[in-house]
Image (cartoon, grey):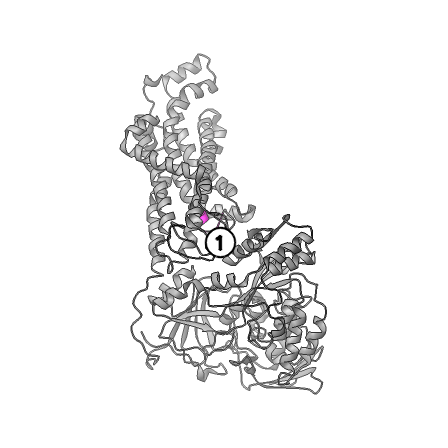
Amino acid sequence: MRRLRTAAALTTALAASLLLAACGGTAGGAAPADVTHTPDPDKPQVLKWAIDFPANWDPVVSGSGAQFRILALAYASLTEIDDHGVAQPGLAKSWDYNDAGDQVTFHLRPGLKFTDGTPLDAEAVKLYIERAKTQENSALDGDLGSIASVDAASDTDVVVHLTQTDYQLPLLLGQRVAQITSPEAAKDPAKLNTSPVGAGPFVVKELVTGSHAVLVKNPDYWDAAHITIDEVDLSAVPDPATVVSGIQTGVFDFAYLAPSQVKAAEAAGLDVVKQPGYNAANISLNINKAPFDDPRVVDAVRYAVNRKEFVDKVTFGTGAATDQPFPSGYIAYDQKSANLWPYDPEKSKALLAEAGHAHDISVDLVIPTEQPAAEIVQSQLAAVGITVKIKVQPDWATPFFAKDLALSLYGTTGRESPVQTLTAHFGPQGPLNLSSPYVPQGFDAAIALARQTPLDSPDYAKNLQAATRAGLESQALVFTYSQPNLFVKSPRVSDLPAIPGQVHWTGVTVAEK
Amino acid sequence: MVRRIARLRSGRLALGILLVVLVLAVFGPALAPFDPLAGTDAALAGPSADHWLGTDYLGRDVLSRILAGSTVSVLGAVQVALIALVVGAVPGILSVYLGRSFEWLSLRLVDTLIALPFLVFAVAVTALLGNGIPQAMFTVGILVSPVFYRVSRAAALTVSRSQYVEAALLSGASIGWVVRKHVWAKVLPPLSIALATTMGAGFVVVSSLTFLGIGVQPPAPTWGGVLASELQYLSYQPWAPLVPTVLIMLTVWAFNLLADAVRDVTGEAGRALTRPVTTPVAPVTQRTA
């Protein structure tokens, strides 16, 4: 009884403290004291980054676009991209295709090594790619279908034999797919998943899963000369609403920022970083399951979606509507397909009536966490007569990737390779194609042509856009909005390189408080 | 008893607040001026003549969501208290009369339940059985039931050792008759206090769970859920969380005031609740016989 009464009596304090704690996040308090970006050369530069802590630290099993940015602290990738999304040297200083375009040789920088001392040579890259293709829990095997085999021609030459002509490899083997892991550490994949060993700009000194990690500068990183940060302290953020106050008070220097917190961050005098990206959100339909096995119902959903409402209420105006798996302006964005399915609720209702489903459709929308986008989908579909029941299912990933759901939501952070983005969404085994093995007619041929087009060909953009056009015939996806990658940083942290979709620390400095 | 409680100032205040909460729970959804699930373009708008408490992140009327959410919030607390009462009080009384085996078993079970953190356990059960208030509250009710077990057992022990009960049993009265005639009257006052306190605690639990998004599926409104969503948009509406917060605080406070008032009006029997319940108390006099 005493316990109960004490608990009840604590309610007041609990509620009040909740409110007070949250209020701390919004106070438009004074901006932090003037700072310069000039670090004190006598003191180590420490960056405190608040993150959604990765569940997996092995890039082969991670599979999450947002978390590759964090894993990139510990792992270096075979290639990089520049601020235009063009492939650039990484661990590989260059690459050559054969005349047929079905074999590419990556030339590694000499003398590379992992943080455990293992040489980072052609054999290590070969073992990594083979592991990514064959490991049972690999999240990357679907992306490596073009790779038939890999040879280590010398210590520094990795020869990749392809199943087809595919000029996307330099983009494909970037941060998303080819963060190379130590072959020695990968002998125990379970251990690697909690104790990362790579050759990235930082080496993990301490890691407590779900809590925090400390990484220190890796002097053997291939571009160590341009890394000025000495230490990165990662901390798990319990609530996005506390991020702004955390940075304001110096607990963190850098963090992801929810769109709803932009106003608070700006009021607090913090730097809001709108990092470019390839993000796109979608409504995933499974045409192998009722009610979406009727194309008229799919079309009704397409016409029922008001993208502006997502932009206004989910991105708070920071994003933009998109009807393709990337934002407009991207090289693969097909202008000819823009606004293919305009918002037209009356047409949607007519299609449902024609299908004999004026008011009798009910479907579960299964999502991993509560999100306003789900409620918007629910209300927009309700407006045309489709009843949507939202089900929050923490183990959502299992049925989603097993294609067991009828309706869900997904948001991609994009990939370096536009062909990879397209196949992930529209390919027969694409992880984001909830209707697998369904593939829209003409997509296979169009994507093959895009693969076969060299990246510097004048036809490259045209062929990519044709593949996008073919993919958009898919009944499995309704794209809604694109949101830039939002971050908030202390003014003590200098500007980040504007690499689309990535977080690069090259050249970034952290000034003394 | 209600009249006696109403004679106390704190009792009147508690009853007044709880009456309002009851009205909200019963008529709240009907009183809502707007559809609590219907969004508008005016997201996160401030208070106005149309929307007294403004609108939320999807442009829904906050007042309507609070009114519509009253039922779930209050019913959850009632469910916790009633389940705890039935699951706890009945075995608590029977443990005195059904022999040593039942007594030993029930005491060990109660010890086990006390060791389980009910909020965490409720989260686990909803993950296992599905996200719903009934299963969450059923779990919490079971885990809170030791309170009623101990209170009812202590009172029953007191009565069972009194001479008039022994005399009744020697005269051939059945255990059921003794329980109905003598034990129940003795157990009722402390149980009433425990019930009021548990309702308050149950309200905290319901609000906490719905604050965390457990027990209800979006977009169903609850007081805890409204509070949680308002906290995400403090830079737009810093005052917004005050309304659900104050409602929760007032309701829990009223339940505790009511418990105090019940204790005050039930005198000696009610105060027995505050005695150590694991140790049998001395037999009371025969004045209640």
Callout 1 amino acid: Gly
Q: Is residue A89 above or below residue B116?
A: below
Residue A81 place in picture, x, y as percent:
54, 80
SS state under label 1: loop
Residue lying at 41% horizontally and 42% vertically, measured from the top left: B203
Which image quarter: residue A191? Answer: bottom right
Pick the front one: A478 or B30: B30
Is A411 left or right of A272, judged from the image as shown? Answer: right
Which residue is at the far top? B171
Task: Read off the residue under disc 1.
Answer: B39
Q: Nearer the viewer, residue B205 or A290?
A: A290
Q: Which residue appears at 28% of the width and 28% of the height?
A: B7
> Is residue A109 toward the left or the right of residue A402 in the image?
left
Q: Residue B235 in the image: state x and y as whole percent.
A: 37, 60
Q: Position of residue A244 (x, y in %)?
A: 38, 65
Q: Is residue B210 magenta?
A: yes
- Magenta range: B209-214
Relative to residue B209, is residue A169 depicted above or below?
Answer: below
Can I make out residue A153 in this image?
Answer: yes
Output the chain of dot 1.
Answer: B
